[in-house]
Amino acid sequence: MLRALRWVPDHVEGNAAESRFAVHRRIDELVGHVGHLETSAVTIVADVAEMKPVTDDVKRWKLMGIGALVVTGIVAMALGVSFAEAIRRIVLAIVDKV
């Protein structure tokens, strides 16, 4: 009986070999995909490192632009108030003469 259990038909061995071959083929495909992903990741990291100085410059320009707009707004407000005050004094001077 024990001898009968140890006997493995040829078609079972063939199926096992085909199954192992399929598993090895899939593993080889996965290794190729992982290698491709690693290469892509390295490329992306290099691209991001290359873009960082440009991004920093753009941020700096944006802050400088906002600062310039604030200064321009303050100057415009001061000129507007000064102009309004000048017109008020002119009108008052004209009204007082009349």
Image (cartoon, rainbow, N blue to C red):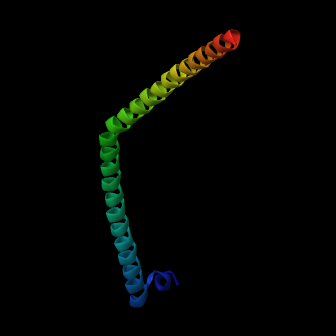
Q: Quadrant of residue 59?
A: top left
Residue 35 at x, y percent in the picture = 31, 58
Q: Is residue 90 left or right of residue 19?
A: right
Q: Is residue 36 left or right of residue 4?
A: left
Q: Residue at x 31, y 49 (%)?
A: 42
Q: Nearer the viewer, residue 50 or 64?
A: 64
Vertical arrangement, residue 89 with respect to residue 53, above or below: above
Residue 21 at x, y percent in the picture = 35, 77
Farthest residue in the front direction?
98
Q: Quadrant of residue 25?
A: bottom left
Residue 5 at x, y percent in the picture = 50, 82
Residue 68 at x, y percent in the picture = 45, 25
Vertical arrangement, residue 33 with respect to residue 18, above or below: above
Vertical arrangement, residue 72 with respect to residue 82, above or below: below
Q: Residue at x 64, y 10 (%)?
A: 93
Vertical arrangement, residue 16 with respect to residue 46, above or below: below
Q: Nearer the viewer, residue 10 or 91?
A: 91
Q: Is residue 95 left or right of residue 72?
A: right
Q: Nearer the viewer, residue 41 or 82?
A: 82
Count of numbered marks: 0
Q: Residue at x 33, y 68 (%)?
A: 28
